[in-house]
Amino acid sequence: MMITGEAAGVRFVAAPPARGGRRLVLVWHLLGEPGTPEAMAEALPLAGLDAWRLYAALPPWGEGPDPVADGYVPVVESAVAAVPALVTAARQELGCDDGPVDLVGGSAGGHVALTTAVREVVPVRRVAVVNPAVRVEAVVEASIAVGALESYTWTDASRAAAEPLDVLARAAHLDLPLLVVRGEDEYPAFRPVQARLCAAAPDARLVDVPGLAHMLVTAQDVVDSEVTAWLG
């Protein structure tokens, strides 16, 4: 049975542990597919974990003209800013313990998880990300490649907005167990950055999944198994 709730304006659904565990796992969906907390819970149920799995909604895309400074960056930054409120709600409403949390996310949701960990927004135990965004520059490159953007001209303002989300530049601060699950058909713009992140982070593992593209619509059972084993 899924439980619904809201914290700091962020809607979430939560799945209870099967055996009464009180550990908390925060999960963020993709901007593509699966693109809602419910869809992410279906694609990545993590039912093998004796922990609460809280699937948080990403903020809506901004309405300004700049897709970086007004769009993507505020989505990630707002989601990261809401993490303490989500953790508090999970402890108060779900009875989760006060220990370090686990973080999971796909694509932009992976960017949220990585940024939360690297900034030490809350104490974190382990992180698992699927086809994560690591640098905004790669997000722009991939968006142009798939036709989501016709073109993009960087400005001083957009570069300043993007710089704090450069997880690769801060990889040394990811001094905790990190799993990166990467699709064999992942965006070409993302693959090298993900590999460099795993090479630079002190305790990282990179797993390539056959038959998985960027969106988490295939090989879901394989991804679920890898993430469950990592967090379990």
Image (cartoon, rainbow, N blue to C red):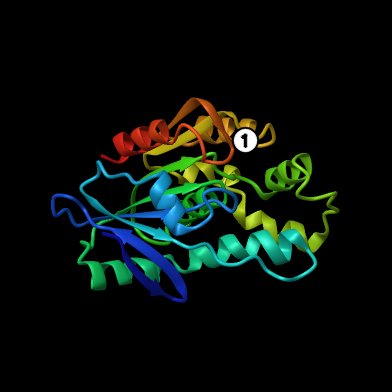
Question: Which residue is labeled 1 in the image?
Answer: 193
- Which amino acid, by three-letter code, is at mark 1? Val
Image quadrant assignment for residue 168:
top right
Check the image and report above or below for 12 versus 228. below
Nearer to us in this view, 74 or 40? 40
Locate the C terminus by quadrant: top left
**Is residue 157 rendered to the left or right of residue 31?**
right
Nearer to us in this view, 214 or 113? 214
Q: List x then y, in percent, for residue 176.
A: 37, 42
Nearer to us in this view, 203 or 76? 76
Locate the N terminus by quadrant: bottom left
Residue at x-position 83% and y-position 59%: 155
Residue at x-position 32% and y-position 36%: 230
Image quadrant assignment for residue 159:
bottom right
**Is residue 7 rendered to the left or right of residue 99?**
right
Q: List x then y, in percent, for residue 150.
A: 84, 49
**Circle 1 residues within 10 Å: few <14, some 14–19, many ≥20:** some
Q: List x then y, in percent, for residue 146.
A: 74, 41
Image quadrant assignment for residue 142:
top right
Check the image and report above or below for 21 versus 232. below
